[in-house]
């Protein structure tokens, strides 16, 4: 049940009870015997935002994405139903909107991203009527479907701002779903679909950009890059863009417009000592620890991590935060990942086991014992002097990364089955280790995976 702070001090304070905050709190609940944790979250409701794309496309009613926040507060956690009004990390404290000062030993910052509706004149006032819609507002998300369903031809405009947004794919996904609907009901041949984006490319990730360009061409979508939406005139159904290269003003009249609004870090973070230069919470992208306040762990959309701002990214970040937070509580050094992707024989098929992907453990300050080394060199020998050497220099992730094809794995010995250990590993004291990285090789994986033998 929501409370004012039941206490003035918590071992762990999680601020923000959205995807990231709840995930971390729930995972900690499973790992900690003594659970002295509070979640600061003002909202009575929790929203599964990825569903909003499908709500806008008429597949689900929006109510399906809404749950009571209380249903997600882990057992044993206190829920402080207030907002964070101020961060005071030098005093290990936050101040709530109700004026309470709460101190902590460890802080998890998960406030999400702020939607700056007010930055586009005409947007906040015009949204939800006259063909102006946005999937980024729970209040209006069902109006997107109304616009798509009632579209009888003309111009359907979809926009993308110059800022970071949550789910970089969502501004396009709704456009493709709309295009599909227009084709099914036979209005596509009398309509123009425009994607006006402030970005200089259709998508940030090269591999997907190339494919999406083909999709846009196939669907005859009019792609206008470097078009930054600066003003809306909902009554006249006109959108005004600034061309970011020429600074020219371009007016696009529309019959329906789906707007992805500009976004930024929450103001309370921007104004706090936790913020980096761009306003996001500063974070070591490997350990997910704040570089200046080591008892602070940022996660999710509000963090300065160089990942996409998505629930998918959080799914990979959360175990890292949890593992490294627990390490910090035990006074152990933080793990810094790196490493190589290992498959099949290249991974060293020892005792019938193949280690697929293995992050390298790199001690934050050179404090960790060397991890174990498992592998084969090109000649098939098991632990060679070269591998041994690499293990001893285990802080040199670049050394290992510069060595394709990967022929070895560096893993903490505690994670290796005993049979394997006896056979081929240099022993090493167990080190708590986990990995997160923006390396595309590792994007899909965090931590260690030793597939079952067989
Ligand atoms: C239309 C749309 C489509 C999407 N599609 C996908 C998708 O397909 N796949 C995907 O992975 N992701 C998708 N996402 C993104 C995903 O929903 C977010 O990245 C994710 O929810 C971010 O989690 P978070 O915990 O960082 O922020 P949130 O889940 O937004 O939670 C932040 C929480 O902090 C609280 N808060 C805010 N300010 C304060 C304060 N001052 N004090 C205390 N609490 C505060 C808020 O009330 C909120 O509960 C989509 C998002 C949208 C809007």
Image: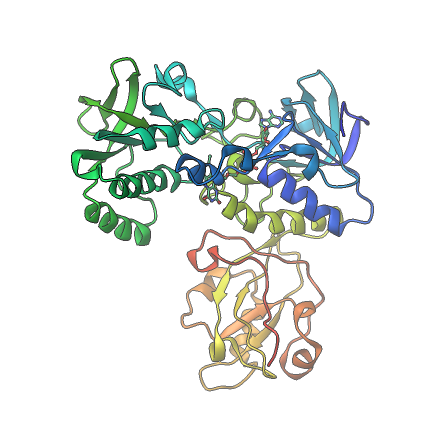
The residue drawn where x is 47% and y is 64% is: 399
Figure quadrant of residue 186: top left
- For this rendering, which residue is in front, 319 or 295? 319
Figure quadrant of residue 314: top right
Residue 197 vs residue 282: left or right?
A: left
Instruction: Return the x and y of residue 125 as percentages of the image width and height.
Output: 39, 14
- For this rendering, which residue is in front, 239 or 353? 239
* Image quadrant occupied by the C terminus: bottom right
Residue 84 vs residue 164: left or right?
A: right
Instruction: Return the x and y of residue 387 as percentages of the image width and height.
Output: 54, 75
The residue drawn where x is 44% and y is 64% is: 401
Rendering colour mode: rainbow
Residue 141 vs residue 3: left or right?
A: left
Residue 72 in sight: yes
Figure quadrant of residue 135: top left
- For this rendering, which residue is in front, 100 or 250? 250
The residue drawn where x is 57% and y is 64% is: 394
């Amino acid at each position: 049940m929501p409370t004012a702070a039941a206490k003035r001090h918590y071992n762990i304070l999680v601020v923000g009870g959205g995807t990231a905050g709840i995930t971390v709190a729930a995972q900690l609940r499973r790992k900690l015997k003594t659970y002295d944790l509070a979640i600061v979250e003002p909202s009575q409701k929790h929203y599964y935002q990825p569903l909003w794309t499908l709500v806008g496309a008429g597949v689900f009613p929006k109510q399906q994405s809404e749950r009571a926040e209380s249903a997600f507060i882990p057992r044993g956690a206190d829920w402080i139903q207030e907002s964070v009004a101020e961060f005071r990390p030098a005093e290990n404290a936050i101040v709530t909107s109700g004026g309470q000062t709460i101190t902590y030993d460890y802080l998890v910052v998960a406030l999400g991203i702020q939607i700056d509706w007010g930055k586009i004149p005409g947007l906040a006032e015009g949204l939800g009527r006259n063909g102006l819609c946005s999937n980024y507002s729970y209040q209006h998300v069902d109006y997107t479907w109304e616009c798509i369903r009632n579209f009888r031809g003309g111009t359907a405009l979809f926009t993308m701002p110059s800022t970071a947004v949550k789910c970089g794919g969502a501004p396009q996904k709704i456009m493709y779903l709309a295009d599909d609907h227009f084709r099914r009901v036979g209005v596509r041949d009398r309509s123009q679909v425009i994607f006006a984006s402030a970005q200089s490319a259709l998508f940030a990730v090269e591999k997907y950009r190339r494919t999406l360009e083909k999709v846009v061409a196939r669907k005859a979508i009019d792609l206008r890059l470097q078009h930054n939406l600066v003003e809306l005139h909902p009554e006249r159904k006109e959108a005004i863009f600034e061309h970011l290269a020429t600074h020219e003003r371009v007016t696009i009249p529309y019959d329906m417009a789906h707007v992805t609004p500009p976004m930024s870090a929450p103001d309370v973070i921007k104004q706090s000592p936790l913020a980096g230069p761009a306003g996001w919470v500063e974070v070591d992208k490997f350990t997910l620890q704040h570089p200046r306040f080591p008892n602070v762990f940022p996660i999710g959309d509000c963090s300065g991590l160089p990942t996409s701002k998505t629930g998918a990214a959080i799914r990979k970040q959360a175990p890292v935060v949890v593992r490294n937070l627990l390490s910090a509580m035990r006074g152990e050094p933080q793990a810094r990942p790196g490493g190589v992707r290992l498959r099949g024989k290249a991974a060293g098929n020892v005792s019938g086991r193949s280690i697929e992907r293995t992050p390298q453990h790199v001690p934050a300050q050179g404090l960790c014992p060397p991890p174990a080394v498992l592998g084969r060199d090109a000649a098939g020998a098991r632990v060679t002097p070269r591998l041994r050497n690499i293990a001893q220099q285990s802080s040199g992730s670049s050394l290992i990364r510069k060595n394709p094809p990967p022929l070895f794995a560096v893993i903490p010995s505690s994670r290796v089955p005993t049979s394997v250990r006896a056979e081929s590993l240099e022993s090493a004291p167990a080190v708590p280790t986990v990995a997160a990285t923006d390396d595309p090789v590792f994007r899909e994986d965090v931590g260690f995976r030793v597939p079952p033998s067989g």
